[in-house]
């Protein structure tokens, strides 16, 4: 398929435009060049964006696709009147029809993170990220009972990125705790976790994939050997079965899929959007 350029234009961070646009574009096997144009919050910046979009149209010999979340109508008008692209405006497509349906006027807020200093949700999200960093890899048992979710599993099974995603995306205080050879020798979970059983969720991974990941960190080590990975995964899964802990394999799953499964299984009370 011929080259196409896709622009994500926003007067904020552009995260909403990118998330929405990429979710749609994932349905198509297309050769696409993505360009981010965040903080397009003035008439002058809008004209600059138009020039960039139109230049791409000329170079590609194809109409660019432009996803926008522009709250400022004057800025949006410059884009819509001047650009030679296919405009996908989220406000006109979704917000305006919802205004009519709900009989309410939207606040046309610029992005999810606007007025962050005034937002309790934002501050809650920051607190959750800090908590997850402090309780990463079993670093601290202090205030462990405040965790919304506690992930367990062998080293490099995906606990840290999943914990941070849950904190950043949903404002959850997500701790993670590694299962180590000493735990396998004792044949039971670390004592600090026993009182938090309802919050526990296990992550596992195929030994072959685990060995590959560990070799990137510690090449040719016992830690990364396939035999050791097979042993650790086998023991960790057996321990989770004995303890009645829900778990899944991260081998072929994205962080988003892992996190969604965790939310469905644990139903944490506090979620921030």
Image: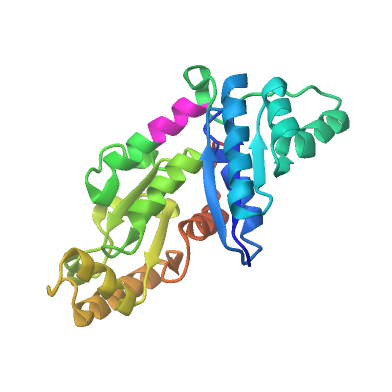
Could you tell whether 196 is left or right of 134 in the image?
A: right
Magenta span: predominant SS is helix
33 part of magenta stretch: no
Relative depth, front residue between 41 and 266: 41
Relative depth, front residue between 241 and 227: 227
Residue 220 vertical placement versus 25 (above, below): below
Could you tell whether 167 is left or right of 92 in the image?
A: left
Residue 76 vertical placement versus 185 (above, below): above
At x 57%, y 38%, the residue is 52
- The picture quadrant where one finds residue 191 is bottom left
Residue 225 vertical placement versus 118 (above, below): below
Relative depth, front residue between 126 and 184: 126
- The picture quadrant where one finds residue 45 is top right
Residue 233 percent coordinates (x, y): 30, 74
Q: Hey, which residue is sitting farthest bottom in the picture?
A: 227
Could you tell whether 254 is left or right of 66 in the image?
A: left
At x 34%, y 59%, the residue is 152
């Amino acid at each position: 398929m011929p080259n196409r350029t896709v622009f994500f234009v926003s007067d904020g961070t552009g995260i909403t435009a990118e998330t929405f646009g990429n979710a749609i574009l994932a349905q198509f096997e297309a050769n696409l060049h993505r360009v981010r144009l965040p903080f397009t919050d003035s008439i002058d910046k809008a004209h600059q964006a138009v020039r960039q979009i139109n230049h791409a149209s000329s170079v590609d010999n194809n109409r660019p696709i432009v996803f926008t979340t522009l709250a400022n109508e004057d800025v949006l008008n410059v884009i819509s009147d001047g650009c030679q692209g296919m405009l996908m405006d989220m406000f006109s497509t979704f917000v305006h029809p919802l205004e009519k349906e709900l009989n309410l006027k939207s606040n046309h807020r610029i992005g999810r993170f606007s007025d962050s200093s005034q937002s309790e949700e934002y501050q809650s999200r920051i607190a959750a990220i800090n908590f997850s960093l402090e309780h990463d890899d079993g670093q601290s048992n202090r205030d462990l009972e405040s965790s919304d979710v506690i992930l367990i599993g062998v080293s490099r099974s995906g606990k840290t990125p999943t914990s941070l995603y849950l904190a950043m995306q949903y404002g959850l205080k997500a701790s993670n705790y590694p299962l180590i050879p000493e735990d396998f020798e004792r044949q039971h979970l670390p004592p600090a976790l026993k009182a938090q059983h309802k919050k526990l969720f296990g992550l596992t991974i195929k030994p072959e994939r685990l060995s590959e990941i560990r070799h990137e960190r510690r090449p040719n080590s016992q830690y990364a050997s396939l035999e050791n990975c097979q042993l650790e995964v086998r023991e960790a899964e057996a321990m989770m079965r004995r303890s009645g802990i829900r778990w899944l394999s991260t081998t072929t799953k994205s962080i988003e899929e892992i996190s969604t499964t965790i939310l469905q299984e644990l139903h944490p009370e506090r979620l921030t959007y």
